[in-house]
Image (spheres, rainbow, N blue to C red):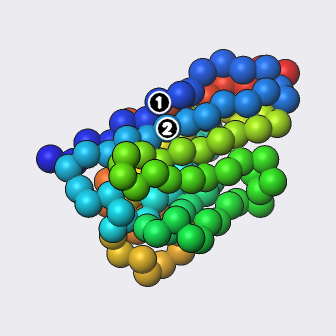
Amino acid sequence: QVQVVESGGGLVQAGGSLRLSCTISGLTFGSFGMGWFRQAEGKEREGVSYITASGRTTEYTDSVRGRFSISRDNPKNTLYLQMNTLKPEDTAMYFCAARRNFGGYWYDSNTYTFWGQGTQVTVSS
């Protein structure tokens, strides 16, 4: 059984930093591309960042590029999202997701198979 568990969310002031973690069990982590998504209240889920199975390639949505950094530790089955210079508009529930099929756009949530329950990030102004 695959388990996906996010952690590291919390309340932070604008300009601050947080580091999200996502630990996965029950699958061969190094064979899956991994994405971070977020969903703010009343809005659709959006892709934030993506990293290929090897970790060699990363993607970011425009609004976080230069502030967020995605990484992974395959031996530890863990995905990270370092978030710096946080803004109130970054407030959302953050989810990590895994996909085995590398076709399709990385920000298309339909291409992901396994999802966590999310961790809340709240940025105060």
Q: Residue at x 56, y 53 (%)?
A: 71
Nearer-N-terminus badge (1/2): 1
| Residue where numbered disc 1 is placed | 7
Q: Amino acid at mark 1?
A: Ser
| Residue where numbered disc 2 is placed | 21
Q: Nearer the viewer, residue 82 or 96?
A: 82
Q: Nearer the viewer, residue 1 or 53?
A: 53
Q: Residue at x 70, y 40 (%)?
A: 83
Spatial CA span between label 1 and label 2: 5 Å
**SS class, disc 1:** strand
Q: Residue at x 72, y 20 (%)?
A: 12
Q: Residue at x 56, y 70 (%)?
A: 56
Viewport quadrant of the C terminus: top right
Q: Say if 68 sits above or below 27 in the image.
A: above
Residue 17 visible? The answer is yes
Q: Say if 8 sits above or below 95 in the image.
A: above
Contact between marks 1 and 2 (CB within 8 A): the answer is yes
**SS class, disc 2:** strand
Residue at the extreme left of the image, as rendered: 1
| Spot occupied by residue 123 in the image (x, y as percentages of width and height) | 73, 25
Q: Amino acid at mark 2?
A: Ser
Which of the 4 quarters of the picture holds residue 31? bottom left
| Spot occupied by residue 79 in the image (x, y as percentages of width and height) | 47, 48
Residue 63 visible? The answer is no
For this view, does 67 lie left or right of residue 115?
Answer: right
